[in-house]
Image: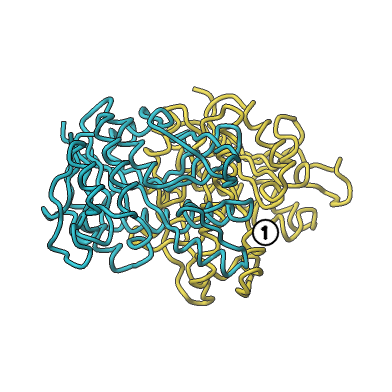
Chain colours: A cyan, B yellow
Amino acid sequence: MQTLKIFKIGGNVVDNPQILSKFLADFNRVSGDKIIVHGGGKEATRLASALDVPVTMIEGRRVTDRRTLDIVTMVYAGLVNKRVVAALQAIGCNAIGLSGSDGDAIRAVRRAPEPVDYGYVGDINASSVNVRLLTDLLGSGMVPVLCAITHDGDGLLLNCNADTIASSIAVALSQVRETELIYCFEQPGVLTDINDKSSVIPLITPDDFPALKESGVISAGMIPKIKNALDAVRKGVRYVSVKSSDDILGCTGTTVRL
Amino acid sequence: MQTLKIFKIGGNVVDNPQILSKFLADFNRVSGDKIIVHGGGKEATRLASALDVPVTMIEGRRVTDRRTLDIVTMVYAGLVNKRVVAALQAIGCNAIGLSGSDGDAIRAVRRAPEPVDYGYVGDINASSVNVRLLTDLLGSGMVPVLCAITHDGDGLLLNCNADTIASSIAVALSQVRETELIYCFEQPGVLTDINDKSSVIPLITPDDFPALKESGVISAGMIPKIKNALDAVRKGVRYVSVKSSDDILGCTGTTVRL
């Protein structure tokens, strides 16, 4: 059985019709079973602004009050998710959009209000993922497209982090088959010099990481992503790739593995 | 095999948390395979108003320009659909929310701009419905919850009429099993006197309809619904019921059959 590939795309992809279209065309050419997890933060910020709902971010995470929850539910589960699904259907890829509530795909736990009250925000891990549902959909030839809205099983929708959803799905499915997680972003990989796109670090292993971190080669924004990636490979994901959303079929990128 | 029941609920149900909660609790007690199709027009009108997007209705149908399409996609496929799904999950009903684009569930044809240009509005019939997808989901023990957003298979999302989606699904699935279509609304059935809730007409057949219409017993707003219902039973749906969303387990209501 071919490796299952889970692609995470963020705002830089879903907010730009041309970049999204190129990504989806390439994604459609990837063979074997595959899943997309998407963000959509910029569009949510735009709608919040149009509705005069203040946006509060703490350490890059959106504080989600009741009105913000409605906004992210509308944007992530509605606008962005259905745009991606309809665009994939148009190129012959049988996509099915899911929030965590659909088919109980991902059940989150609402984050405690201490030390920071993020509001309607959920935390998940691999055990939150409905492996059977995703396996059944993949087995029927469908391509699950997941947004970052989950539920608590008690009627509450919760805003989650899309990177964590992608890694939790990859870890959960690695229990039943070989999985690869691909974080797509605007750079060709993890760079040693942010101004030099040719300075991609081809491989990072758990042994390399402390030195790369201490020397400052891996900088602030990339540290949580690489920690997340190392955590995923320790928990069973075969590879995590960090690469450009513009070149997912190419060989350039950073691979994280044991 | 038990009759498959397709319930259509409109704005009066999805816009009112208490009515919705009662409806979903009753729905959860309905035995056998079942599907929900929902509207959500009032919430969409509210969002349009907050965003200063003018709302234009022609003969009860929403004219859907580009911005309105985004609004109805957000409200129907995001906010309302995920609220219903999460509420069902909370009471142990394994709901899965779908737009017509998800799994290519319903493929519509964009309506011609003549004689009236409704914008991004789609028309469907029974042949637009992906019977295999719905049958597979039902066979896996899931309860499909469909909103009125569809796609054209070419990347465009389209706004459809939820009544027509419900009847098209019922007709399409009647090819493979016995189906019943239940239109839930704020009255206990089709009334001979709009001010007297006890004046429910228990049964309407194709033979009765012309006389009921001519005598004015069935009034303007109900005519398209009954026509739709008669069309559905002529095309294979066993029964169409028109009943109160507040009493779907009760016996009160109007049955339309051959």
Q: Is residue B27 visible?
A: yes
Rendering coords of residue B156 (x, y %): 39, 63
Q: Quadrant of residue A166?
A: top left
SS for callout 1: helix
Q: Is residue B114 left or right of residue B48?
A: left
Instruction: Please tell me which residue is depicted at 71% across the width and 41% down the height of the picture.
Output: B245
Circle 1: residue type: Lys
Numbered circles on residues, count: 1
Is the residue marked by circle 1 packed among few (<14), some (14-19), or many (20+) residues within 10 Å? some
Q: Chain of mark 1?
A: B
The residue sitting at the top extreme is: B1
Instruction: Please tell me which residue is depicted at 59% across the width and 67% down the height of the picture.
Output: B62
Q: Is residue A253 above or below residue A171?
A: below
Q: Nearer the viewer, residue A52 or B159?
A: A52
Q: Is residue A27 visible?
A: no
Rendering coords of residue A174 (x, y %): 26, 30
Q: Is residue A222 above or below residue B51?
A: above
Q: Quadrant of residue A236?
A: top left
Q: Which image quarter is the C terminus of chain A in?
A: top left
Q: Is residue B50 above or below residue B96?
A: below
Q: Quadrant of residue A173?
A: top left
Q: Which image quarter is the N terminus of chain A in?
A: top left
Rendering coords of residue A159 (x, y %): 51, 46
Instruction: Please tell me which residue is depicted at 43% across the width and 65% down the height of the picture.
Output: B110
Q: Is residue A19 left or right of residue A108?
A: left
The residue sitting at the front extreme is: A215
Q: Is residue B58 above or below residue B97?
A: below
Q: Nearer the viewer, residue B255 or A139?
A: A139
Name the residue tied to disc 1.
B42
Instruction: Please tell me which residue is depicted at 16% across the width and 35% down the height of the picture.
Output: A2
